[in-house]
Image (cartoon, rainbow, N blue to C red):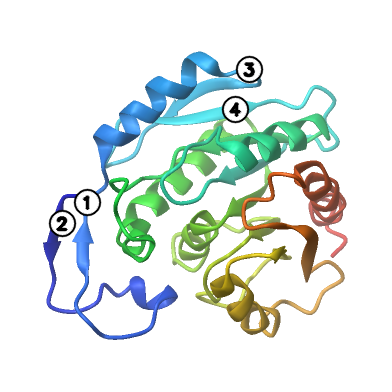
């Protein structure tokens, strides 16, 4: 793990974690990311591999899946995975392909990763680079003529999305679906939010959920939703999750929240 010690906690870390103890600052593990790309691209069944460009990385993998029968013209979803995985992993594959089947095109992007032994809390040091990748995803979709966008994000990916949405450079999105989010919101959401939590989610997710509920927008769509009979990874509830997300996005994209 490539780390250097800093004198105080990284400012972005404070968004998620409390305490002022010194923390390790870890650089993104590009070699690990390259191995993930080599592993998944040849095995892609649904969608196409495309590559985004950021200041830190000239080729960032993303999987674009176009809806065969679009429910909304010029609309798409950015799908964001959690710590240490990839844009075709487990639940993310189910979301990106299931949402496209339901009529909304998806762009699932490779987020920066740390080495396999890095603690989850150190991922906060990657938030600036994650912001760049989310901005590149928005730019890619705009180039394709997309006008209405939403983010569906899981676990640490939800915290990365939150950091982007809380930043001054973030664009206005139609909706956001954090799934199994590990932290409170960095700022009060400016868009409709469907905050999804598993019945047997991590204790950290369950403990912080009431704080997020108190800061949701008071609109027709924003709410917390608990998915029964599953855990943080929702391996046995992917279809049910997609079925719950689609009506929320339909209302949000139609401006009916």
Q: Does residue 215 sit above or below 237 in this rendering?
A: below
Q: Residue 127, image x and y in percent?
A: 37, 58
Badge 3 crowding class, 10 Å Cα cut-off, few under 14, some 14 to 19, many 20 or more, is: few
Q: Which of the numbered marks, if any, corresponds to residue 45?
A: 3
Q: Does residue 146 sit above or below 207 in this rendering?
A: above
Mark 3, secondary structure of its residue: loop
Q: Nearer the viewer, mark 2 or mark 4?
A: 2
Of the image marks 3 and 1, the number of the one nearer the N terminus? 1
Marks 2 and 3, how far apart at CA? 36 Å
Q: Which of the numbered marks, if any, corresponds to residue 64?
A: 4
Marks 1 and 2, how far apart at CA? 6 Å
**For mark 2, what is the residue?**
3
Q: Residue 100, image x and y in percent?
A: 75, 32
Q: Residue 82, image x and y in percent?
A: 50, 50
From the viewer's perspective, tell me whether residue 202 is left or right of residue 169: right
Q: Nearer the viewer, mark 4 or mark 3?
A: 3
**For mark 1, what is the residue?**
27
């Amino acid at each position: 793990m490539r780390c250097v010690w800093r004198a105080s906690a990284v400012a972005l870390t404070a968004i998620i974690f409390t305490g002022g103890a010194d923390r390790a600052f870890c650089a993104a593990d590009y070699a690990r990311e390259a191995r993930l790309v080599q592993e998944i691209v040849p095995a892609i069944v649904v969608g196409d591999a495309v590559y985004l460009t950021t200041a830190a990385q000239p080729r960032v993998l993303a999987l674009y899946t176009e809806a065969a029968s679009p429910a909304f013209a010029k609309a798409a979803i950015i799908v964001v995975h959690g710590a240490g995985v990839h844009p075709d992993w487990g639940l993310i594959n189910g979301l990106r392909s299931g949402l496209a089947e339901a009529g909304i095109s998806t762009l699932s992007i490779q987020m920066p990763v740390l080495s396999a032994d890095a603690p989850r809390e150190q991922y906060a040091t990657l938030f600036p680079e994650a912001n760049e990748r989310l901005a590149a995803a928005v730019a890619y979709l705009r180039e394709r003529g997309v006008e209405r966008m939403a983010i569906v994000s899981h676990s640490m990916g939800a915290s990365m999305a939150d950091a982007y949405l809380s930043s001054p450079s973030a664009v206005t999105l139609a909706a956001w679906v954090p799934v199994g989010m590990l932290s409170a919101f960095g700022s009060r959401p400016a868009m409709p939010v469907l905050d999804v939590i598993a019945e047997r989610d991590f204790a950290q997710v369950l403990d912080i959920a009431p704080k997020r509920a108190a800061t949701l927008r008071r609109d027709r769509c924003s709410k917390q939703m608990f998915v029964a009979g599953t855990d943080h990874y929702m391996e046995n509830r992917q279809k049910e999750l997609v079925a719950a997300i689609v009506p929320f996005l339909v209302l949000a994209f139609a401006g009916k929240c």
